[in-house]
Image: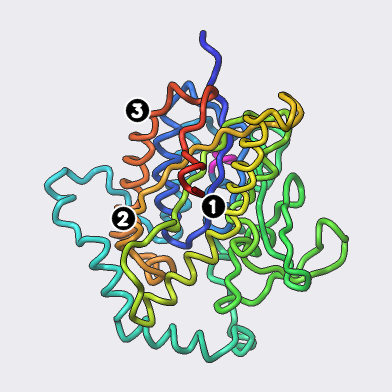
Amino acid sequence: MSQPLRINLALQGGGAHGAFTWGVLDRLLEEDEIEIAAISGTSAGAMNGAALKSGLLAGGRAGARENLDWLWEQIGAIKTEGLTDWMQAWLPDPGHVSRSVEYSPAYVWTDMVGRMMSPYGWGPLYRNPLTPVVEKFDFGRVCAHEGPEFFVCATQVRDGKIRVFSGDRITTDAILASACLPTLFQAVEMEDPETGNMEAFWDGGYTGNPALFPLFAPDLPQDIVVVNINPLHREALPRTPPEIQNRINEISFNSSLLRELRAIDFVQRLQDQGTIAEGAMKRPLVHLIADDGLMNELSVATKLVAVPSVIGQLKQAGRRAAGDFLRDHKARIGREQTTDLRAMFG
């Protein structure tokens, strides 16, 4: 029997667009040769990671796929596998749906209120809508030493630095903090894993979307598969207020990932030049699964509003993107990097 292809997963946050990651994971879990050694996730990536790990420990690959299905059913997803190709063709184009939501009176009003009113202004009426979903995770398995190592990223509000939660420190509050957009949700207060003090936390996307450095541990494989759901590149200049706000969101939530990828590229250059002795530092092999074409058609509206038709199509897009990656690059896992970082930062 051949050795498994061990990989680490780095799962970005992006609200309901995390359904793309659901599709990627669903397809990867069909590959018996691939072993997931570790997961680093932020926001929706953390929720996907928790569902994946607990499902794996409960029922293997099939259990992980079922648990991811359950998660997105909770969020508002629909299963589209039963639809025939001709029925799929009649689903609304996700870009059209996104624009319809973006300019709907209800969304415009909600967005306006969100900019003018603090989430603390709701008083006793406030409730984080993700809480009932996250509370249902099997944290005995999410935090278990068995299975993939799991890391959840959040941002400490007072010092503005990243915090990474792992093991028993991954709780309902840790995952909610990782997904805490401060314009929508009240900060999550819990014990800081570094200081032991009670601190407030916001979305991990500001400082690590997701964090790659936990995946550099010596016992973990070199290969890091980044599932990217915030487009790195947009051709068109944003002109309308929603387009401008959306691009600001994308740039800010990609900045931490790009910084870490640039650092990896820098170390790789030093290793290639012989400045760093071979074996002195780990050499990560970076792979990227994304669909910037589709994500360019979407906006922040469908990140915040879970539209079933869009979520179902995002899952299928994730499956296709993962399938393309496996077809083109599976044989290169463990041998070479498939993302051209030199071109990205050249």
In the image, is 132 to the left or to the right of 191? left
Specify few, some or many for label 1: CA neighbours under 10 Å numbering under 14, 14-19, or 20 or more. Answer: many
Question: For residue 290: magenta?
Answer: no
| Residue at mark 1 | 45
Q: Is residue 155 visible?
A: yes
| Residue at mark 2 | 294
Which contiguous range is marked in magenta? 52-56
In the image, is 322 to the left or to the right of 189? left
What percent of the width, then of the height, locates residue 48?
52, 49
Q: Earlier in the sequence, mark 3 or mark 1?
A: 1
Q: Which image quadrant for residue 143?
A: top right
Q: Which image quadrant for residue 185?
A: bottom right
x 44%, y 33%: residue: 28
What percent of the width, then of the height, locates residue 318?
37, 45
x 71%, y 52%: residue: 170
| Residue at mark 3 | 327
Q: CA distance from mark 3 to mark 1?
A: 24 Å
Q: Of residues 193 and 159, which is closer to you in this image?
A: 159
Q: Earlier in the sequence, mark 1 or mark 2?
A: 1
- Contact between marks 3 and 2 (CB within 8 A): the answer is no
SS category of the residue bearing label 1: helix
